[in-house]
Amino acid sequence: MRYHDIVVERMLGTTQLVYHSTTWADEIIRAGGFEGKTICRVGDRRMDGTSFTRSKHFATQYSDVIFGMDFQRLKTRFKVIPFADDRISIISDEPGDYRREAEEFVAADFIPLEPYLAGIWINASSKDEPEYARARRHKLYRGTFRPQ
């Protein structure tokens, strides 16, 4: 199955996905999940957690490895805060992506991969890099993608 076929409309079969792009895939897999290292401010409250994007396009532009997570399962266990960051300019030269980048911020000190992980994809140009060996061997590795 090709990446494009899988992530159209943020779906993997009947599973709605959110994505986390990273170059730290080996560390995330070794730890068994995401450590909440991102800070989100909602009003006067500061929360630690992990950011996920709703945009497959943004995910492919940002980094070499994409973790696709089951959005509905995440919402049943964690506090999920919709968030839009209009300050992100990483892909501002890409047509059609001048809109605000839409995120789901998951407020948690740690988000385990199981049972939320739906798939892992690696940038085709980086798939043979040694630092992504754990991602390639993971049971939910689903193939490669090419930045769109």
Image (spheres, grey):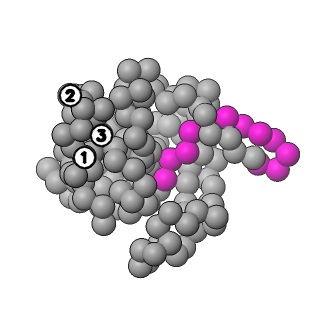
Residue 49 among magenta residues: yes
Q: Which residue is the site of mark 2?
A: 137
Please name the amino acid that badge 2 sits on.
Arg
User: Decide: marks 2, 3 in contact (CB < 8 A)?
Assistant: no
Distance Cα–Cα, label 1 vs label 2 = 15 Å
Question: How far across and how far down the image is residue 28, in percent?
Answer: 42, 28
Distance Cα–Cα, label 2 vs label 3 = 10 Å
Highlighted magenta segment, given as a residue range: 42-53
User: Decide: marks 1, 2 in contact (CB < 8 A)?
Assistant: no
Q: Which residue is the site of mark 3?
A: 120
Q: Residue at x 55, y 66 (%)?
A: 89
* Figure check: 8 above or below 120: below
Disc nearest the viewer among 1 and 2:
1
Q: Is residue 60 left or right of residue 127?
A: right
Marked residue nearer the N-terminal end (1 or 2): 1
Please name the amino acid that badge 1 sits on.
Ser
Marked residue nearer the N-terminal end (1 or 3): 3
Q: Which residue is the site of mark 1?
A: 126
Q: Residue at x 60, y 34 (%)?
A: 37
Q: Residue furthest left?
A: 1
Q: Secondary structure at mark 1?
A: helix
User: Decide: marks 1, 3 in contact (CB < 8 A)?
Assistant: no
